Image: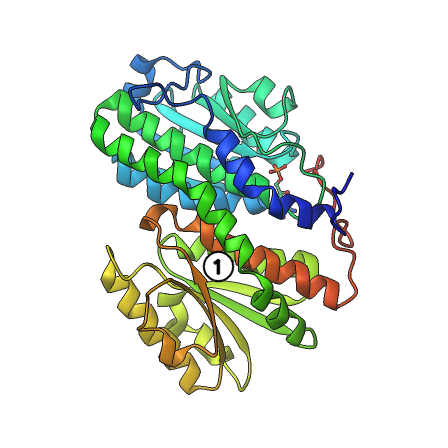
């Protein structure tokens, strides 16, 4: 049932192009408009929404952090993202005009469930993004947008994460569509980009051998740091989480701009630092800033592992290891940039003799608070 792979995680990483494509399937009509009929919250109600609040845990929370960039950019509705376990206990400000999005692969995560119950008690509408048909979270929500990743068996979430991103992009575009903040042409253009992304994920998967070799060479390290900016920041957090849970290594993700406010003190000789570099096109200021961050940490001895777009030559002089990803629109980059980090963590876990599919102390769905 592992389809010839040694681990479910490897199988699930390989299934990502299909999972991404399946999550788009049937959600776009012939004219290129989104048809999310399953989102049974009326267009009139969606037009009234004045705040989006995303609640989730772990990897799903990282998908939510990325969704915030897309939702605010495409709809101009303010969006907050909060760990479900923190949300309810701080008496959040919610009302009937707040749209709460609960993201959960399993649909059974107790913290997320309690957060959505709390939101509904305040009169907010709750939309679930979920991978498990008929599970508790979608049942208790006003509406659900299913991710079509297929069953995810490995404890470490991979394909579910990519499909959560796709679902978040769809929700953001749909909100833009019903509210008229995004014109049909622009929505169509993003949808076209999304439709191509599955092939790009496939291309990334074909180039992962050097990433595996690199990971094996780092098996005796104790710490790996991850840096990113903009949507690359949650990707860095996700890379660090994967490494913690699979390789049992100390791993931390930082916003690259925060380096000088503290974390740069951690840099020492030969410390591996993974940097997710934004596209040099579009938000070029961010790109230039991160290139100087790479320079800074390298001057202090870090071993730089740079994930950068094909054709980005500015990073080359400062990259001890360079991992290329395809050119993608800025907001969609997490779909390709996360994949090498999954492979990296999986290979490090194997090299350290860890149980890949069932890491110690973890459960696939966390049904206690
Ligand atoms: O089933 P959920 O998406 O609600 O699960 C949330 C987290 O428990 C989950 O993403 C966890 O962080 C994974 N083990 C990460 O790989």
Nearer to me, 318 or 137? 318
**Residue 257 position within the rendered picture, expressed as x and y whole percent measured from the top left:** 35, 66
**Residue 89 position within the rendered picture, expressed as x and y whole percent measured from the top left:** 54, 38
Considering the image in quadrants, where does the C terminus appear? Answer: top right
Nearer to me, 14 or 265? 14
Using the rendered view, name the quadrant where residue 138 is placed. top right
| View quadrant of ligand 1 | top right
Nearer to me, 47 or 188? 188
Count all numbered tags in the image, as a single digit.
Answer: 1
Density class for disc 1 (Cα within 10 Å; few <14, some 14-19, many ≥20) is: many
The answer to whether residue 248 shows anywhere in this view is no
- Residue bearing mark 1: 236
**Residue 111 position within the rendered picture, expressed as x and y whole percent measured from the top left:** 61, 36
248 above or below 154? below
265 above or below 36? below
**Residue 367 position within the rendered picture, expressed as x and y whole percent measured from the top left:** 71, 34
Q: Residue at x 67, y 38 (%)?
A: 152
Q: Residue at x 47, y 26 (%)?
A: 25
Left/right of residue 246 with respect to residue 300 in the rendered view? right
Q: Secondary structure at mark 1?
A: helix
Check the image and tell me how it is coloured: rainbow
Using the rendered view, name the quadrant where residue 279 is placed. bottom left
Using the rendered view, name the quadrant where residue 368 is placed. top right
The answer to whether residue 277 shows anywhere in this view is yes
329 above or below 109? below
Left/right of residue 347 with respect to residue 334 in the rendered view? right
Q: Is mark 1 within 8 Å of ligand 1?
A: no
Considering the image in quadrants, where does the N terminus appear? Answer: top right
């Amino acid at each position: 049932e592992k389809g010839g792979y040694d681990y479910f995680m490897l199988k699930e990483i390989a299934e990502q192009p299909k999972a991404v494509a399946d999550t788009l399937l049937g959600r776009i009509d012939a004219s290129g408009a989104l048809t999310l009929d399953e989102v049974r919250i009326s267009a009139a109600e969606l037009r009234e929404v004045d705040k989006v609040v995303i609640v989730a845990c772990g990897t799903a929370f990282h998908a939510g952090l990325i969704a915030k960039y897309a939702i605010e950019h495409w709809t101009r509705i303010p969006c907050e993202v909060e760990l479900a376990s923190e949300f309810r206990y701080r008496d959040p400000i919610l009302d009937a005009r707040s749209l709460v999005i609960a993201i959960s692969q399993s649909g059974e995560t107790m913290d997320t469930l309690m957060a959505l119950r709390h939101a509904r008690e305040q009169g907010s509408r709750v939309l679930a993004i979920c991978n498990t048909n008929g599970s508790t979270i979608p049942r208790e929500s006003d509406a659900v947008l299913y991710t079509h990743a297929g069953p995810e068996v490995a404890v470490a979430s991979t394909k579910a994460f990519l499909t959560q991103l796709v679902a978040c992009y769809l929700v953001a575009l749909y909100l833009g569509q019903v509210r008229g903040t995004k014109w049909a042409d622009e929505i169509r253009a993003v949808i076209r980009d999304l439709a191509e992304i599955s092939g790009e994920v496939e291309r990334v998967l074909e180039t992962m051998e050097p990433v595996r070799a690199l990971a094996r060479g780092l098996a005796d390290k104790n710490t790996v740091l991850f840096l990113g900016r903009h949507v690359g920041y949650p990707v860095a957090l996700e890379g660090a989480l994967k490494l913690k849970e699979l390789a049992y290594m100390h791993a931390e993700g930082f916003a690259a701009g925060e380096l000088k406010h503290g974390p740069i003190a951690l840099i020492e000789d030969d410390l591996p630092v993974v940097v997710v570099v934004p596209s040099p096109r579009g938000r070029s200021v961010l790109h230039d800033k991160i290139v100087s961050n790479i320079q800074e940490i390298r001057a202090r001895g870090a071993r730089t592992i740079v994930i950068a777009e094909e054709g980005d030559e500015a990073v080359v002089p400062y990259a001890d290891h360079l991992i290329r990803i395809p050119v993608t629109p800025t907001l969609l980059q997490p779909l390709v940039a996360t994949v090498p980090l999954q492979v990296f963590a999986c290979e490090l876990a194997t090299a350290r003799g860890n149980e890949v599919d069932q890491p110690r102390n973890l459960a696939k769905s966390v049904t206690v608070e």
